Amino acid sequence: MASFYSRSAHLTRVPVLVGRTMINNSAKSTAVTGITGSRTFLSMPGSRSLKAPKPPAMRTGNTVDMWGQKWDDLLQHLRTDQQALFQFIDEENKHADAYFKRTRNLTKSLFKEMNDFLRVESTPRPVPDVTDGWEYWSETTPRGPVHYRRRQFSKEPRELVLDASRIPGTLKKVGLSPNHQFIAYVVEATGNEWGTLSVHEIGSKDPPAQVENVRAFSFEWVDDETVAYTVCNDQLRPDRVVVGKWRDPVEKHTTVHVDPVAFIDVSKTKDKRFVTINCNTLESSEVLAIDTQAPLDPPRLIQAREDGVQYYVDHHTSQFYILTNADGAEDFKLVTAPTATPSKQYWRDEQVPLPGDKIEDIDLFADHIVMYVKRGGASAVQVRDVQGETAGAVHDVPLPPGTTVQPGINMDYHVSSVRMTLQHPYAHASIFDYDMKKRHLLPRQIQPLPIKEFDASEYDITRVWVTSRDELARIPVTLLHKKGMSLDGCNPVNLRAYGAYGICMEPMLRLDTLSLLKRGWIVAVAHVRGGSELGRQWHTDGKLLVKKNTFHDVIDVAEFLCQQGFSQPDLMTATGTSAGGMTIATAALYRPDLFRAIVLHSPFVDVLTSMLDKSLPLTQTEFLEWGNPQESAAVFNLIADYSPYEQLRRICANDTPPASLPALFVTSGLRDQRTPAWQVAKFVGMWRHVLARTDRSAARDLVSTCATDGGHFGNDELGQSGRLEDMAEEVSFLLDQVSGTHMKLRSEMDAEARKALGDGNALAKIAGLLKAKI
């Protein structure tokens, strides 16, 4: 497995051994002092007529002077003046509480509805994961998940492995020792995305041993006594691998590899022969291997780094299996190399994908290779036989339509069945086992939504293709909607997009989606350039100097939905998270007339400031995605043009009154290390300054919340109930912003339709009305 860091997540780029971590859990984090207005949900007083918070004071003294351009960043002081930052966040949180007071009944109703979506008639029995003769499974409790095991086929009582709900912090990764006697795990306690590595003997009442004073990020067992783990530097980049006996003090551990540029993680090959040291940037890879049969020997280099060449390594019997884009294999191919000579000159093609297919992931078994493929933007799974008379034969797994595949844990190597999870936007995740010899897909756990709350048979999934303005691309868009949808321009739409790092935007189950669909909305998932839904080139066409393609694609999709009668600008909303928040914010500021409201979660909106400051986490590693504005005037000018904060700054500097901006709901976290709270506060503050210059009749709502215990992925302390409250608030904001317009349009349409029917010229009248509205 090979992974790297981005503003979106700790990602597995092409996760060769994805899902080996047995347990993932969230728990409470510590609080941040200095802000009194911590967000409390559904309780704070407010009024229908809300007084907006004052914009933060502008200050000179922070000058940007580069490539012949010069200006003052008048809100940059929010980075260093904590008192000013905390005061502004406090005022915004109080204003948000007051805003949601007026939608409190709706929010409570949505909260109950979303809880009802989760209701099941009977709790499904856990489906154990089997490895080395043991069965492991998890059970949910009000406190959190608890993990158990027993011997396979045994009737003995279950044995407690780990009660994750009692661990003070966020459990990041867990791994079993080869002999199944110990369990190791990394716990993040401060929101810094690194944590403490601990080892516990299963069944023992003794406290776990800890690897002290180490900022651990990932780890892997080398043998029952030895662990290899990565350590983060001050840039939040795991830059080194340390190996040692876990019972020994850290001083006796040995640093075996340091990488000056890459993000490093460690993983174990499926046959358990090697621990791989995976050193990845956004564009290239270098992998070293520790032989578990000789753990004290220096790691062996598989292939030295080459610009533009990515590769990911597993091992099977006497050879390495390598997934790579070498030799122009843009959408990756599978090659093999002898164990003794693994360098590139010995690579031999094993599986080259068909045109239009991209191999995203592989999983090795003794007799088969499973390949997870993206085909025309949809999920596909292929199985290749590697033993016996059928060696080399490849067949497709018959998947239910409309599903997205996630690989299962699949810890056992000597089996003929592969487990996978199938995701669908109108059903809970389902677990299937596929018999690779009998070619039979067996459901192990299927949990439909409660039909009383959401009847999936009443809804449909439609794929439409939008031609881009440059006519170089057809943008796939997944539409979730009620059956019998009318193309009368009166459907509210929530448009969602990401478009960065080659990440695919998958249409999976979301409770907020269900609530919108029940109210007649269309949810449009736009697979814009910058992702990799249509292959690696799709990513390339949406980054660096052609980054504007991403934003133009969002605008083109929104225009298409209006022109084709799906909706109209007064009913068009959009949602984005992290880099996707930048995508949506940029598109909405380019075309504020096209969107009624937008929602941004932990948005990356101060792009130029980030990319000019090498001291910030992630900046240097992300030059390959956004470009380096210090070394290129073209990059500087491009980022300055599209960065949402810079767009707002220019609007404020313009003497002419700004156009009406969409309503905005933005969330952030004070502990966020990827999109820091001070950057989001700058963006919100500049938006406030724009609103102060906007005609009052044209100004729309701006609601901003900052979770004082929240990081980039939210607030671990909230639990399921808190997350549902967050979603209920978001949906209530969207409904509040468009409900009046929606009801008015429907009323007008009904009146005009009745009138048209009365004079016998219905079709022409209605067609004319639609044209005028759209």
Image (tube, helix red, strand yellow):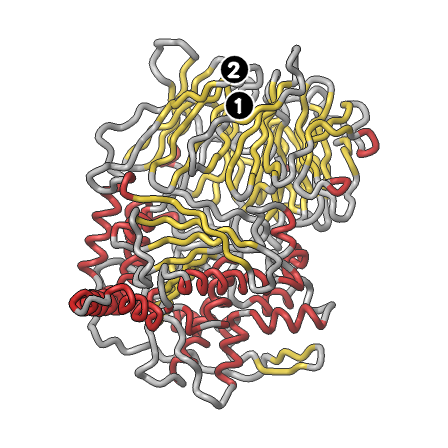
**Residue 126 placement (x, y as % from top left):** 35, 24
- Viewer-side residue, 748 vs 97: 748
Q: Amino acid at mark 1?
A: Met
Q: Quadrant of residue 1?
A: top right
The residue carrying mark 1 is 411
> On residue 375, which mark appears?
none
**Residue 310 placement (x, y as % from top left):** 70, 42
**Residue 722 placement (x, y as % from top left):** 30, 50
Marks 1 and 2, how far apart at CA: 9 Å
Who's the residue at 66% across and 37% down the image? 242
Q: Are marks 1 and 2 in contact (CB under 8 Å)?
A: yes
63 relative to 603, above or below: below
Q: Amino acid at mark 2?
A: Asp
- Viewer-side residue, 267 vs 294: 267
Residue 45 seen from this side: no
Q: Quadrant of residue 630?
A: bottom right
547 relative to 385, above or below: below
Disc 1 packing (10 Å; few <14; some 14–19; many ≥20): many
The residue carrying mark 2 is 132
